[in-house]
Image (spheres, coloured by chain):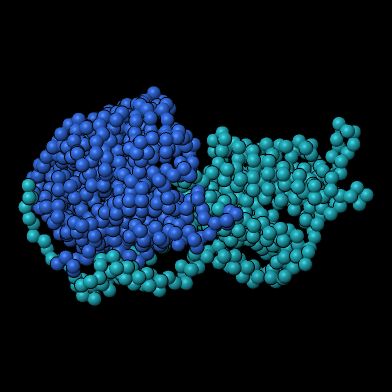
Chain colours: A blue, B cyan
Amino acid sequence: MSGAVSDVVMRAQSVSKVYGGTHALRGVDFEVRAGRVIALLGENGAGKSTLMKILAGVEQPTTGRLELDGHPVRFESPSDAVSQGVAIIHQELNLCPNLSVADNIFMGRERGRAGIVDYAEQRELARALFERLEEPIDPRRPVGELRLGQQQLVEIARALSEDARVLVMDEPTSALSAAEVQVLFRVIRDLTAHGVAVVYISHHLDECLEIADDAVVLRDGAVVASAPMRDVDLSWIVENMVGRDQSDLYAPMAFAPGDPLLELRDVVVADPENAGRLAVRGVSLTVHEGEVVGLYGLMGAGRTELLEALAGRNQVVSGDIRLAGTSMTGLSIAERIRRGLALVPEDRQRDGLVQALSVGRNLSLAALGGFLKGLVLNRQSETAAVRQMMSAVRVKAAGPDAEIGSLSGGNQQKVVVGKVLMTSPRVIVLDEPTRGIDVGAKADIFALMAQQAKEGRGVLFATSEVEEVLHAADRIVVLSRGRVAGEFDPRTTTREDIMAASGESLDGRTTSGGDRA
Amino acid sequence: MSTTAKERTDVESDRSARISERKRGLGEFLLDQRAFVALIVLIIVFSLLSDNFLDPSNLVTMTRHVAYNAILALGMLLVITTAGIDLSIGSTVGLSGVVAGLLLQGWELSLFDTTAYPAVWVVVVISLAVGMAVGALNGILITRFNVAPFIATLGTMYIARGAALLISDGATFPRLQGDPELGNTGFSFLGTGRPLGIPTAIWIMVLFAILIGLLMTRTRFGRWVYATGGNERAADLAGVPVRKVKMRVYMISGVCAAMAGLIIASELTSAAPQTGQTFELNAIAAVVIGGASLAGGRGTVKGALIGAFVIGFLSDGLVMVGVSSFWQMVIKGLVIVLAVMLDRGQERLKEARAAAAAAQSLRKDLEAGPTPTKRPIEPRHHEK
């Protein structure tokens, strides 16, 4: 064997995967080399996740084979893959909320002898892992109490604890702040320096450009392009992924604000998951008719807590929320929806969709009252409205009866947005609407937001991505540690300004406001 | 200023943690330990209403009554923690008793034209094995054929009851004390023996509680039980043998039920096929009163035991005080519903306390003067 071949740790040879009648992968060849980060790029449905699952033993290929160190292998299960040195960080969080952080990290691989768990050792190892990730999470805390971002760090810590030679990362940063992403990147560089091969998937193409050594682009289940990362740029990636230019990615701005619609005055919100702490410490802001307001902040800035308080899910300790002049204090979630305030939640799997219901039933769920004829639902008008909404939000699905689970992440998100729009809201509040969805769907979601604003509604969306607020918002409000740290006009602001106001400096370190001033 | 934001947040959270610590009053402690508190309240109320409730011999008698319910609850706890349910245990109680009765009365082996009289320990082992087999059947239905636990165990509930009736032909096996000439005496020890002055049934309950307690808290298997109930998919992906875990918990539950059946048959020195009807509901009630969640992932041995004691002492106490059996049922039902309501209430109280503590810490922040805020950053133009 020549030297060039020997550093290939893992290889997939003409791997295909068929689900039912659809080809998720068609004869993919894929090489993973020691000490290098390979970015796997492609839109949702391109087959990235399927390939990942095959590499990590979650799924078995229909045809083709895997090789590890030049020998054919077959992984019967994820733990089988781990035992042979291949670990995966899943896109969806796979944690037990009732168990502690340490228990989750060592789940299925508990430390100890003769079936007796050595909890002290597990805690120590977990603590060391979080030191490496620069996030001091107490290993004894139940995972259910952690923020989404911290839960993702637990997933990452688990994968690190497996000491894999091949580490597959499927959207490892979807809930992380920019600072945490930089920490992760340092960890990745450290791993590759020790000869670990990393397969990296992310919708954040800038992340891929930064961390990866090689790029492979999948489209419709086949590899369409591959190149060393230093030879490619963003437009090369996007063109290969979607076959169109990036300039139409974000919606054009149409900003003609009218009267104030949603007014927040000195809103204080308790942290629902940590007794005795405040998530939001006195936020005032206004959303006008026809305006898209982007709420930017790092993890822990209080974005989600603020938005959930608006929707009536979190308790407001003090302050006032007014919709078109009337106070919303004390109103139930249903009452708020009826008055025209609707939330698209952050975690669409958990909070946004009923998996057992079809696309159509999910869409009409929050607006069923409108289809009532006496006590009976008028199916015809329901179906008509659902079809209309499906085309309005551009859901790609077989029809209203399609299963929710059969849709890609981006299309599921469009269903959640469509469901909210069916309640004919006056203000639409979206929490991380583009989390984990592909560029095409992102563009559709932003176009939808702009369209809603154009029709006179108010839109408030939260994001942890600077590019998104810069491109999709008419006005940017930056949150930092529960307070408004600044308001910006996207046409006259730079990425640096926004990041600085959020308490995030460009080298990725979080610094206090005092340092910066 | 040299402190980083992270350090400052820690200091802050320390302070608010201290505040919330102080706010944590007696009320919350009582709510947290509500099952235990309920038990104490029961004991106090009944000891006031009845002179001999606190009599040591009465306490021992009541605890003996609790014992088999507690053993059933321990098995049920394992099942419920995996987000399952086992409705078959009441029938298994009857079946194991009848199997023991059959063996002690003499097992006619027509093939050899003899009647076998196995030793008592053999009878016990076979009866427990029968319980385990019912559990294994549950496990197979649930893990191999993906039948929902409620339905699978509802089915085996009827099957096991029917089997008990078939074996005994609907009759009761009387006089199980055995015959010295046949060498099968001693079965009554389980129900009426008193090593060190304490009934055997109580010893068995303690033994089962310790074993299952260690299993749940110290072993890998125990972690897997909690993981399976907490998030089955996550457990599966992490390499936890979820099917095996479920299989095992139903088998353990079956063994617990068979043990309870043996204790009851031994106590009565007779085995009736109807024994154990609705016992599964008592076990579920005990587990739920003890703070377990039917959604899985949550529950402790201590809680299940206390729950069994609450139900047992409540029943016996009401009898001693002379409450009619109709009212007994109403009161038992109210206690179960109240337990679950308190569980929900505790969640809400926690949230309310968190909010109150947070508001207080904010007021303190404000009193301490304005916090250093950022210098407003002057907007610059895009460089491009």
* Residue that sits furthest to the front in the current view: A2
Q: Position of residue A430 (x, y in %)?
A: 24, 46
Residue drawn at 18 percent across, 35 percent down? A236
Asked if residue B215 lies left or right of residue B104, the reply is: left
Q: Position of residue A326 (x, y in %)?
A: 20, 54
Work out whether residue A420 or residue A116 is closer to the camera in this orientation and state it: A116
Asked if residue A412 lies left or right of residue A461, the reply is: right
Q: Position of residue B312 (x, y in %)?
A: 65, 59
Residue drawn at 26 percent across, 54 percent down? A182
Does residue A71 sit above or below A457 in this rendering? above
Work out whether residue B158 or residue A209 is closer to the camera in this orientation and state it: A209
Q: Quadrant of residue A68?
A: top left
* Residue that sits furthest to the right in the current view: B181
Residue drawn at 17 percent across, 37 percent down? A235
Q: Quadrant of residue A353?
A: top left
Asked if residue A356 lies left or right of residue B37, the reply is: left
